[in-house]
Amino acid sequence: MTGGFKCLHCIHCCFFAQEWESPIVFPWEKRLLERMLNDAGLRGVFAPVEAYGPLPGGGCVVVLYRWVVRGFCPFYDSVSRRCMIHELKPLACRMFPLLLELPSGRLMLSAACDAVRPPIRGGVERVFPVELRAAETVLLLYTGVVERLRSLGLERVDASKCGGLVDADIYLEMLAGGEGWGVEGD
Ligand code: SF4
Ligand code: SF4
């Protein structure tokens, strides 16, 4: 395969048979999704998957959430077979069919995508330029947030044992006196 891939607009990007298949999103993406779901009269379920702590009082800082979707994504239009929030969809959707392992940064190709089958001739950069950029952005943002939290003495903890949760970008903004600390794409 050379010169970019052609999406077949099948359902596999947007249909989640199992909870673990659902997209992983940053906290600021979660809040945007919540607003868009709310506007559509819907509610989303978001489960913390990577948290750091401890904070005073037993709270934790969440770096990543799983957007728990079962079946079709509420933003999938099954008639046009398109994403209804294409311009605002999370980075996890933007990078598909590339999958990113964190924290290693290892890239994989989803076996669920019918449009691509290894071997990918021409290189990932050439076949998936847009998707690769999204994956690189995730890695950059993730690494930046985690390094900052570690520099503050926080370590990865079991999110299910946290006394309270605060989104990582909000926490870091709070520490910076509300002036922000440069999360790209927020
Ligand atoms: S946000 Fe869009 S691309 Fe992502 S799963 Fe939902 S419909 Fe699909
Ligand atoms: S699984 Fe592949 S072919 Fe199907 S919609 Fe997603 S990117 Fe396109």
Image (cartoon, helix red, strand yellow):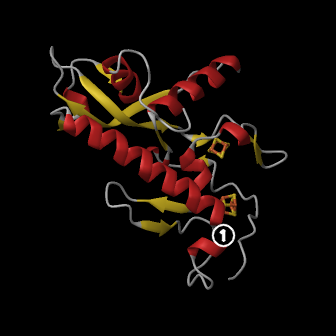
Query: Is 4 rendered above or below residue 180?
Result: below
Q: Nearer the viewer, residue 82 or 166?
A: 166
For label 1, the residue is 114
Q: In the rendering, at what x and y percent does residue 159 appear?
A: 25, 32
Which image quadrant is residue 170 in?
top left
Q: Quadrant of the N terminus?
A: bottom right
Query: Is 58 rendered above or below residue 12?
Result: above
Query: Is 39 rendered above or below residue 73?
Result: above
Q: Residue at x 64, y 65 (%)?
A: 129
**Label 1: how many Cα within 10 Å (few below 14, some 14–19, many 20+):** some
Q: Quadrant of the C terminus?
A: top right
Mark 1: which amino acid?
Answer: Asp
Q: In the rendering, at what x and y percent does residue 82 appear?
A: 77, 47
Q: Give the side of residue 150 with respect to residue 129, left or right.
A: left
Q: Nearer the viewer, residue 154 or 77?
A: 154
Query: Is 97 rendered above or below residue 122?
Result: above
